[in-house]
Image (cartoon, rainbow, N blue to C red):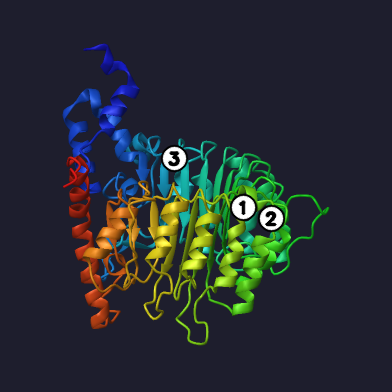
Amino acid sequence: MHRCWLIPEMLQMICSHLPPGLSPNAMSAALAALARTSRVFQGPAIDILWRKQYTLLHFLKCMPSDLFSFRYVGPDRNVTVRLLRPILPSDWDRPLIYAHRVRHLVTETRISSLESFSSLSDVLAAMSMSLPNDSVFPNLEYLAWEKHPSADFHYIRFFLTPTITTLRLSCDFAPANLSILALLPRKCPALTDVTVNCGSSVGESMAASFTAFFDGLPLLENLNMDVSESAILTRIGRLERLTSLLLWELPAELPPPSAPDVPFLPNVRTIVLHDEFEKVAKFFRRCTVTFFNSITIEFPSKGKGPTRHKFFAALAACQHLHASLTTLHLTIDSESMSGPNPYTINSRAFRLLFCFRRLTSLDIATEDGVDLDDATVADMAQSFPDIERLHLTTYSNLMEPRCTLKGLQFLARHCPGLKSLQMTFDASTVPTFDGKGSQTTLTDLNVGFSPLTTALPVARFISGIFPGIQSLVTYRDLYFDEEEEAETEAQIASHHLWEEVRLQIPVVLAIREEGRTWPPRSPS
């Protein structure tokens, strides 16, 4: 046998190079066939088959066939697992052959989109009482404990190993379970990535357990948590290696600063928030000394205009962010509104973002959009010279855009690195393109609900300022649901015209390129 076949890493690489596009079932079948037909590849193929498990069902079915009964009930195919006899030590022989190969485990009760366990309580109880080792999967690196009853939380200790680096916890934390929460850092000292979804507010009596939990995680780098207590957020701020933080609920009262110039969350560079405008504005007023590189915020409601403006003002007041912030993504979930200024974000509030001159990615998704005219777009283009991704997404077609194709021309002139653009503009009037100021970097353009009246002039103009364009889509191409949304004849006609623009752009580019090869015309 060639020496190459004695190198485990080489065999792992070969087993990993399956044809692209295979479904998970086809991939598993191919690996199983390889394991059955080649002794050399048997171990590596089985390793890959068992590396990631999104259910305990496969592991349970390695037990003797007379140990459990599996019954599928109802249209949702709920799996009822019933223990038929006591578990004997010999019953573990076969499953433990595969247990050490599992690196990634999701233990939620749902098996797939079609199947779920009705309950795992009896199974987990029987396994925990008969398990011959300290842990079911000794080499586990990723564990997700999700959607289990609170009474089953204590069984998690049989899945904990010192090798786990990523932990996902999603359950209601009853007071009786908090002692196990404090035990987790000792069982998993290598944790670097933790998600804790409590499912309910954490009271002051429970905050101490979470504080002890974080005290034992000196290596933690990424944290995803719904926080409702100021004491927990204070302790999170002292995690020295924490660089990425997602907070699904902010405390009503934030911890006071220990000193005026002491940074809040000093090491965090990526922050993701989900809360109302008022609480997020209060958060950034507390974060005047921060150095975030990336901010993502999802607002569950639109809020009132003055409240929205206070948020943008609070964000702009964080002067350290002017030099550090490169990514800003905002999503505002709301219904369309009417009134004198029904835009979700008015021009005055939007202009407060122009102080973040190092932005490379700006993504704002709203129902009624941002109030933009050509002057605002011109100022935006000059304020964001490094922008690469600019997505101003509007989910409603009720507003008539005030920005025109001239706005795109400003972006082409002042944003040389822009690669992806999404915004709605009025393409009914096409300005003259003088052949100057082309921007070759942009490849993707989403025109949203942009109206137009004729295709060829628009194709000439867009291909002139963005000759590198490869993809042009409308809102209808990506988001439209015929069962939920109604379209006017004008909107349908506009979409079809943009389809013509998409087809004509390569033709116009080819003609323009061919024209460059023609010899100059001699004077008559």
Residue 500 at x, y percent in the picture? 19, 64
Disc 2 to disc 1, how far (Cα)? 7 Å
**Within the image, what quadrant is residue 356 found in?**
bottom right
Amino acid, disc 1: Leu
**Within the image, what quadrant is residue 232 found in?**
bottom right
Helix, strand or loop for disc 3:
loop
- Residue 181: which numbered mark, if any? 1
Proximity of marks 2 and 1: CB atoms separated by less than 8 Å: yes
The residue pinned by badge 3 equals 137
Instruction: Answer with mark 3 or mark 2, whichever residue precedes in sequence.
Output: 3
Vertical arrangement, residue 90 with respect to residue 453, above or below: above
- Residue at horizontal 58 percent and vertical 59 percent from the top: 354
Disc 3 to disc 1, how far (Cα)? 20 Å
- Residue at horizontal 57 percent and vertical 41 percent from the top: 188
The residue pinned by badge 2 equals 209
Amino acid, disc 2: Ser
Residue 215 at x, y percent in the picture? 70, 46
